[in-house]
């Protein structure tokens, strides 16, 4: 499934700050990383962020919105923690990561061997990390 390549604007809500913080939590990011975007249900997401589905949709608009916000937050934390160079563009990196993930998904659906997918993923990771830590 193609995930939109844009940084979502958070919607205003009484619970907005709490939901945003929850979305940026390690639990939500870990769940996306472990199960992948398609492997996450609304029920899984609401449990991870500790909010109702209506609150989640009111703030993020969609599952894709929550996913992108969690990814941007992780990249921003990496910049703050010195894992990435200062000034790294979180939105652009989000688009890059999503493009790689989408490409791997397409290749997997076409029958590419797991070993080959892992080789490509490791190479993409190495190249991105090399560029971002220079």
Image (cartoon, rainbow, N blue to C red):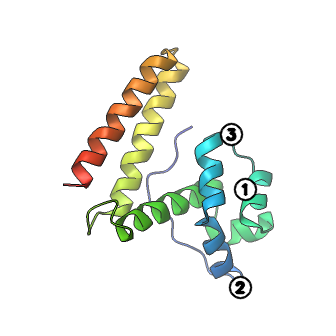
Label 3, secondary structure: give it: loop
Which quarter of the rendered picture does the C terminus lie within?
Answer: bottom left
Looking at the image, residue 42 sits to the left or right of residue 65; the answer is right
Q: Which residue lies at the image location 29% right of the left edge and 45% below the top edge?
A: 128
> Cα distance, mark 1 to mark 3?
11 Å
Which mark is on residue 14?
A: 2
Whether residue 106 is situated above or below residue 1 in the rendered picture:
above
Closest to the camera, between mark 2 and mark 3, is 3
> Cα distance, mark 2 to mark 3?
29 Å
Say if residue 37 shows up in the picture: no
Nearer the N terminus, badge 1 or badge 3?
A: 3
Instruction: Name the residue beneath numbered marker 1.
Output: 45
Looking at the image, residue 131 sits to the left or right of residue 5; the answer is left
Nearer the N terminus, badge 2 or badge 1?
A: 2
Which quarter of the rendered picture does the N terminus lie within?
Answer: top right
Nearer the N terminus, badge 2 or badge 3?
A: 2
Say if residue 94 shows up in the picture: yes
Q: Which residue lies at the image location 58% right of the left edge and 54% below the top edge?
A: 64
Instruction: Name the residue beneath numbered marker 3.
Output: 39
Q: Which residue lies at the image location 36% right of the left edge and 47% below the top edge?
A: 96
Whether residue 88 is situated above or below residue 1 in the rendered picture:
below
Near-viewer residue (49 or 3): 49
CB contact under 8 Å: marks 2 and 1: no
> Cα distance, mark 2 to mark 1?
19 Å
Near-viewer residue (127 or 44): 127
**Disc 3 packing (10 Å; few <14; some 14–19; many ≥20):** few
Give the percent coordinates (x, y) of residue 111.
52, 14
- Residue at the bottom extreme? 14
Closest to the camera, between mark 2 and mark 1, is 1
**Disc 1 packing (10 Å; few <14; some 14–19; many ≥20):** many
Q: Quadrant of residue 47?
A: bottom right
Give the percent coordinates (x, y) of residue 17.
63, 81
């Amino acid at each position: 499934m193609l995930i939109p390549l844009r940084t979502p604007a958070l919607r205003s809500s009484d619970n907005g700050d709490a939901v945003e913080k929850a979305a940026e939590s390690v639990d939500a990011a870990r769940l996306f990383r472990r199960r992948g975007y398609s492997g996450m249900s609304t029920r899984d997401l609401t449990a991870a962020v500790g909010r109702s589905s209506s609150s989640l949709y009111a703030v993020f608009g969609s599952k894709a919105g929550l996913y992108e916000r969690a990814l941007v937050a992780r990249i921003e934390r990496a910049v703050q923690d010195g894992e990435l160079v200062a000034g790294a563009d979180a939105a652009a990196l989000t688009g890059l990561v999503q493009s790689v993930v989408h490409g791997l998904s397409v290749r997997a659906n076409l029958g590419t061997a797991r070993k080959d997918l892992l080789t490509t993923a490791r190479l993409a990771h190495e190249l991105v990390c090399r560029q971002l830590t220079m």
